[in-house]
Image (cartoon, grey):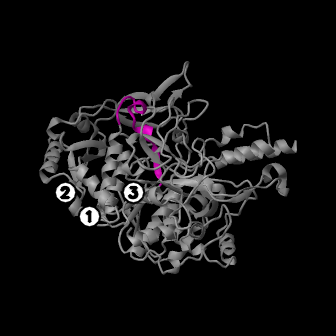
Amino acid sequence: MRNLMHRRVLASSLALLLACPATLALAATDSAATDLGKSNPNQVVNVTLVLKLHNQADLENYIQRSVTPGDALYHQFLTTEQFSARYGATADEISRVQAFLQQHGIAAGTVFANHLAIQASGTIGQFNAAFQTSVHDYQSADGRQFHRPSTQQVIPSAIADTLMSTAGLNTNVKLHPHIVRGNRLGASKSPDMAAAAAAVLAKGNGTATGVPGEYTVGDVANFYNVNPLYQAGVNGKGSTIGIVTLAGFKPSDAYAYWAMIGLQVKANRITVIPVDGGDALAAGVGDDETSLDVEQSGGLAPQANIRVYEAPNNTNGNFIDAFYAAVSDNVADSISTSWGEAEEDYFPQMNNGVDETGVLKAFHQIFLEAAAQGISLFAASGDSGAYDLVDEGFGSPNFSTPLTIDAPSNDPYMTAAGGTTVPYSFNLTYIFGSGGGPIESITHEQIWGWDYLVKYLDKYDPGTNWQQALFSTGGGGGVSVYWNEPSYQSLTLGIRRSEPNQSLIDYTGAKPQTIFKLPANFAGRNTPDISMNADPESGYTLVDSVDFGGNGAASFFGGTSFVAPQLNGITALLRQSNGHRIGLWNPQLYFLQNFFGYGAFSSFNDIRYGDNWYYHGVPGYEPGAGIGSPNVANFNLFLRSGL
């Protein structure tokens, strides 16, 4: 009876553990949503018109040269004005698009400084007429209501040479933060800020705790050899960190976190830039994500400035606008985001036959601009292992589980931040009581995937289907079936192609329905690129007074949401140390891995253990942890050497 009671408690705890804040749970594919008919034609909407790049091949060549040691353009980056003049739309092209909008009664608004997008406002009826479509209202099986075009939009021939796509008519938002709350299998910890602060400071090492589940930025510095930079006086001074997010937050929480761990930071360093009106702060809708982004990036670079580009999570157009604003401003030296959705969410099969991949192309253009301007970009790779769609509710038994990856980390000009588990020990107090029971340990940093917990549970509490409860939480990674393999991965051993027999099948109807079948043996972009500790069981403390009330401190948080801003903060240190922006990390990372490998002087730690439920740790690259985890001081030496 006692064991049964403890199993019930553990099952309840695991249910909480799997409840990622603000993660969308989709009960059925959106292609099965009920069509409620035409949307109100008089409803006013805001739409972003994305303009085509000029000379993209030349732009890609420029980017490659800017991160190639020994090239005359190495680390020579463009201003926004230079970029728009070389690669943006011309004044005549912009005027033609504006005239087209005015002909249909649509108000043409801000033209972004990069000359790649125009904001516009009009009624649904006006946009229907302008782009020969019909926007309808829908209701999904889980009760969500949204509107989107029921037919593919048509770009008129008069502006087809200039206008690439539009964004904002589809309010079927699936973007979610990649944060996971854990409840360690050992003794629970108090979320009290005062107690947590006392515990940190009592250790005498300032900003690190050494306690799994309560790690801070000081522990990150210990894990990944950041301390030599601090010892050399590098603290992020003169650098600016950018955060792109879809949720509001309280800046005071970030200052409270830094004070809690005894970290001296630059005063008044946070600037919030509302995009599309910003986001109204509300508990449980992503404020914890924005808080941790600022706390982690700013904690690793305590003297850097921080700019938070905060948009509402209403349409994919809002996310595009936030990135276009951040990159066009060209103030931030590095930018991270921890929001995303499955790559396949943009495919026609998931949108009632309407192709939404124009959103991916719009992101690609702004990521190219960022690289040309020397802005390093980081995006979380996801928290559902090799099966990204499971994070959105497409899991067994209602659906098959094809191998899928996350966007926008899938883009070749984005550095995809993956997840690991650092060494720690754990047991099961829930089953064995306060005595704790058997203790087991992870002895090497490994790919983050919770099947290691399944193995423990199967061993000490057999007969329960723990895998069903824990699948497929882990670091996102795999092979894109949209973006081709980039040149910087072409010489990398371990790069994979897409696997055969990968289909999303809906089993909820009278007979199975195949939603899509993914291409086999596709030579696609592999993710992640580089990884750091993301397992909430070996995770972190954050401060979020909106969700947790009072002083707002809580522990056992993780997810690749932490890794992207940590890499962002590390980049601020590298930028100060080198006296210039670092640019796109990826070609530089793969060059080092391909030609110098691993060892005492390597910029990476090889991750040879663990798995993300499909891709296993092996020597070199694998789509579980990528190249590995960083040795920051060694990477800095490489950058400073100019090799």
| Residue at (18, 58) in percent of width and height | 85
The answer to the question of whether label 3 and label 2 lie on touching residues, with beta carbons closer than 8 A, is: no
Q: How many marks?
A: 3
Q: Is residue 626 above or below residue 79?
A: above
Between the residue at mark 2 and the residue at mark 1, the CA separation in whole angstroms equals 10 Å
| Front-lying residue, 607 or 132 | 607
**Residue 587 image label:** 3
Please state which amino acid type lies under the numbered disc 2. Arg
Q: Which residue is mark 1?
A: 78
Q: Position of residue 22 (x, y in %)?
A: 53, 49
Residue density around tag 1, few if under 14, some if 14–19, many if 20 or more, within 10 Å: many
Where in the figure is residue 465, as x and y percent of width and height?
72, 37
Q: Can you see residue 175?
A: no
Tell me whether the residue at label 1 lies in contact with that at label 3, contact meaning CB atoms closer than 8 angstroms: no
| Amino acid at pointer 3 | Pro
> CA–CA distance between discs 1 and 3?
18 Å
Under mark 1, the amino acid is: Leu
Of circles 3 and 2, the one toward us is: 3
Q: Which residue is mark 2?
A: 86
Q: Which residues are magenta?
A: 338-355
Q: Nearer the viewer, residue 605 or 263?
A: 605
Q: Residue furthest right?
A: 1
Find out whether residue 92 is within the magenta segment.
no
